[in-house]
Every structure is written in structure tokens, then in C-alpha cells.
Image (cartoon, rainbow, N blue to C red):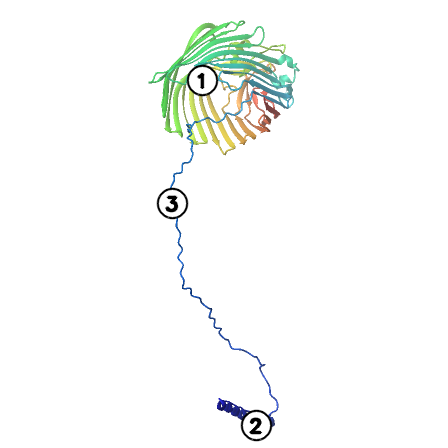
Amino acid sequence: MNIRIASYVFILLLVFQTGLHAQQGQEEIRREVTLYNPFKPSLNKAVKMYFPPEISDTAVTVPQFNYTISASPFMPEYEIKTISAARLEPDPLPKLYKGFLNLGFGNYFSPVGELNISSTRSRNGLAGIYLAHESSFGKLMIDDATQVYGGYMDNMGRIYGTRFLRRTALAANIDFNHIRRYAYGGDPVLLSMNEINKDSLKIQYLNPRADINIYSTRMDSAKMFYDIELYYNLLYQNSQYYQHLAGVNADLGYDMDIFYASLDIGYAMITIPNIEDKFRHRVRIKPAISKRSSNWNFRIGLQLIADARYYEEPPLPAEYKTKLFFYPDLKFQFSVIPTILSMYVGLDGEYTSNNASEIVYINPFVVTHNLTGLIEPSDELYSILPTDTKLRVKGGIAGHASANTGYRLNISYSMFENMVFYINDLLEGRSFNPIYDNGELLNVQAEFSTRLSDEVSMVAQAGYYNYSMEYLEKPWHKPAWDAKLGLDYNLRDKIIANANIHGLSKRFARVGPMSYSSSTDYEIFEMPMNLSLSVGLEYRYTKILSFWARLNNIALNRYFEWNFYPSQRFLFMGGFTYSL
């Protein structure tokens, strides 16, 4: 140890001495020392050794436990309940109100009103009363320079009731209709020359009606079906001009397994006290057999009508006689593509009585205009001959293009005798006289309906009429075509709107020769084609109260119902409906 220390001391002294001599030698040469790097002390990395203590337990403990199982049954309490059988019930019926009141008013001083009061649902029967009124008291223009009073009035009342019995039902109705018109039309040349009181142009018809019928309510087709009706109809103008119409109809049917047999019979008697043709009798017998399946059906029958009355066949005088009218009744329909396309063909005929109680609703201006300017009832209204459609061949297709789209197309060709047309009188053209002709008619009817969405639906209808006349130059007042396009909008039964476009072709009328004309021949007047728009809107404020508005006759030109009888122009009407 000492030797090692002594060696270290010797080496150190030797190095020190050598460095000292070197320094002295350098001082003689160079006396400055330049350090380029500063001194940086540093330590070397060291690895730390870590030895955690460990404890080894040599004692082992094993857990031990003892248990026993005591088995005993568990008896829960329970109660058996019977499950009732499933029962299908219909949806609850909506509330049925006892009636409604509808009131409205429009320009041309036009009030309208409806009142309906009826019993609610009952298994025993129903009864009610219905009243309606519509009128107008305004003036309108015949032409650009002539203004006349063009008012009208329609009143209607009905009392109805039905009693449900075990297998039948007994129904009765009493109707009352009042029609008031004014013969405001006429040749504008003569109307501008004469100022006439409107009361002298008044035309009124009273038309009460009563009927009672008893019919079968059996749903079993193996039982006989019957519907028997007794009716009475009165048309009254004044104490000299009126018509009584009474009759009975019976519709019988029975399923004979092989086919269904039906029989329609009827009798009608007309009395008109103050004209030559006082008593008329008409008997109708219409037997038929039919058969139906899921893809086809057919009907084979005939119709026989016996009509006893005065018939006038110029130049012979009128003669009371009985005429027989015989018509086939054939129809066959089959399904080409089920629910999509079906076709039918048929052969039949038609008898139209043309009695006065029917004509007044078609043309109320069949009256007499005398030389004093008064409008009076006409004998010709009560003497119009029946129209005999001798034979009609028809066919068509119908079906559904989708669940919401349907279509129909009908074509018919008929031969007729004594079809009624109307021409203006020769005094001022205010009234109309019936005129008859024979001929043929080709008629095409088409209809298309679809639901565009849950709220919007559309219906389009069109008709084409091609007359071939035997004597008359034109089918007076008859259109060559007509069309209608309707749109309905329903927003959650809250807002209901509709728009309808009506189209009517030009028509022709026969007039003259008038008293002021030097011509000895009649003139032909042309009534222009008419396109009109009608719009309606209803807002259902509550379930019992709604407000409505209508806009009618929105058109560029006038619509003429009859020659010299233009209709009112733009008509606005608004009102409300209240459920009672």
C-alpha cells in the first residue's frame, strides 16, 4: 500500500516539474492562451440497481364449510278466469245530426235557402221534412241596348217517411214544387219598341205530387222481390189549364235457380178537363229473364206499351185511338280482363210520354203570347205527342285502369219518331211551339275519372250527337257536342273546393217570319258556342258550421238556354251551412 502511494507521489511530482519547464519555455515564445470552448461539467449515466424484498409464506390454509338442503314444495295461489270469445264489431257510426240549415245570397238580388229536419237512426223507421228556395230579382241585357227583367223563382217542399216492418218497408212522400218564370226573351227589335209590365209576362206552375210504395227488404234471393207504388201528380196553371196524372207501378222478381225472372208492369191515367184530349190511358208490360256470373251477365226481355189518346196525323183530323209500341230488351256484358276491361252490347227501344208535368221542367216557355201582350197557358203544352225511339243499338266498354282511375265509353245508334223540337212564335218570339220530326241519332258518351292524390280528384265527361233529320233543316236547340271537366279538392274535410268547366257547341234556332219582316220564309239564328267556369269553396269552421262561396257563369260570351233567352252573366253567391 505504501509503495503504491509513493509511486503516485513520484509520478505527480515528475509531471508537475515537466509542465513547469514547458510553461517557462512557452512564455518565452507566447504569452496568451485562447480557450475556444467553455467548460461544461458532465456526469456519466449510471444504472440504478433495484432489488425489492420478497417474502415467501410456507403456510397453506384450505377453506372448509358445511351445508344441508331441506326440500319443500312451493304452492302459489292462482285463479282461473274464462277468456271470452273474440267478437267483431263495426266501426262506430258518425254522429247523425237532425238536420241542417243552408242560407246564401248573391248578386242579381238572388237569395237561396235550404232546411232539412229528419229523425235520427232508428230500426223502426225515419221521417223528415225538406224545404228549398232559390230566386232572382235582377235585370239582364238581351243585347247591348235592351235591358229586361229576368227574374225567376223555384220553391220545393217535401214530407217523407218510411216504416220498417219485419220483411217489408212502407214509404210515403208528399212533394210540392212551385215554378215561376218570366217570358223576358224575344226578338230584340220588337222588345226595344214595346215596354211591357213584367207581371204580364209571368209564368207559374204548381206541381204537387204524392206517392206511397211498399217493397221487400228480404236479402234472400230465393224469396220473391216486389216494389209496388201508387202515385198522383197534379200540374196546375189556372182554373182552366191543369192536368191530373195517377197510376200504379209494380216491379216483381224471383230467382228460379237457372235464371232470374222479372216483371215490370204499370198503368197511368191522365185527365185534362178543358181540351179535347181529356182522357189518356197507358199500360206497360216488361217481362225479362237474366243471368249473372262473376265474368258475364245477360238479359233477354221485351217491352210492350199500349197508349190510348188523341193522335194527330196531318192532314187528317185528330183521332182517339190506341197505339201499340213494341221494343226488344237485350243486353250481354262480359269481362275481358277482370276489373280492368268489360264490354257490352244491347238492343232496345224507348217510349217517352212527353206529358205536361215533364215538359215544364225542360222548357217552361211553351205558352201563348196573345196580341195584347199577355202570356197565357197554351193548349199545345198538354197535347205534345209521345216520342217513339223505335230501335236503339248500343255498345260500350268500361273498367278501371288502376284502383283510383275508371273510364267508360258508350256508343248508340237509334231511330226515332216524333222527337220534339221547339221554335219561337211569330209574334215577338217570346214563347215556343213544339214541332216534330223523324230521324236517326248517333250518340257517343265518354267519361274518365281519377284520383290525382289523396286530396284531388278529377272527372271528365263528353258527349257527341249527330242527328239525321227527315224534314227539319236542323235539330233546333240541340247541341252537336257538350263537355264537362270537374276538379274536386278536399283537405282533411276542412277545406273543400271544386272547379267545373262546361262546354256547349253552337246551336241553331228557327224564327219567323216576324211581323216586321217582308220575308215569307223563316230565319235561322245561331246561338254561339259557350265555355263557362264555375268555382266553389267551402270552409268547415266546425263540425256543425261551415261557410261557402260560389262563382258561376265565368265566361267570355253569353249562354243562351233558349233562343232569345240569354242567362245571367257572372254570378257570385256566398252563405253558410249550420247543422241542427
Q: Is 208 on the left or on the right of 406, as rendered?
A: right
Mark 1 residue element: strand
* Amino acid at pointer 3: Ile
Residue 142: % across, % down: 62, 21
Residue 326: % across, % down: 40, 12
Q: Are marks 2 and 1 in contact (CB under 8 Å)?
A: no
Image quadrant in which you'd find residue 433: top right
> In front of the other: label 2 or label 1?
2
Vertical placement of residue 489 versus 332, above or below: below
Image quadrant in which you'd find residue 498: top right
Residue under numbered circle 1: 439
Residue 69 marker? 3
Which callout, 2 or 1, points at the residue further toward the start of the chain?
A: 2
Q: Nearer the viewer, residue 510 or 262?
A: 262
Residue 61: % across, % down: 40, 59
Q: CA distance from mark 3 to mark 1?
A: 112 Å
Mark 2 residue element: helix
* Amino acid at pointer 1: Gly
| Label 1 crowd bin: few (<14), some (14–19), many (20+), radius 10 Å | some
Q: CA distance from mark 2 to mark 1?
A: 161 Å
* Amino acid at pointer 2: His
Residue 21 marker? 2
Residue 153: % across, % down: 60, 17
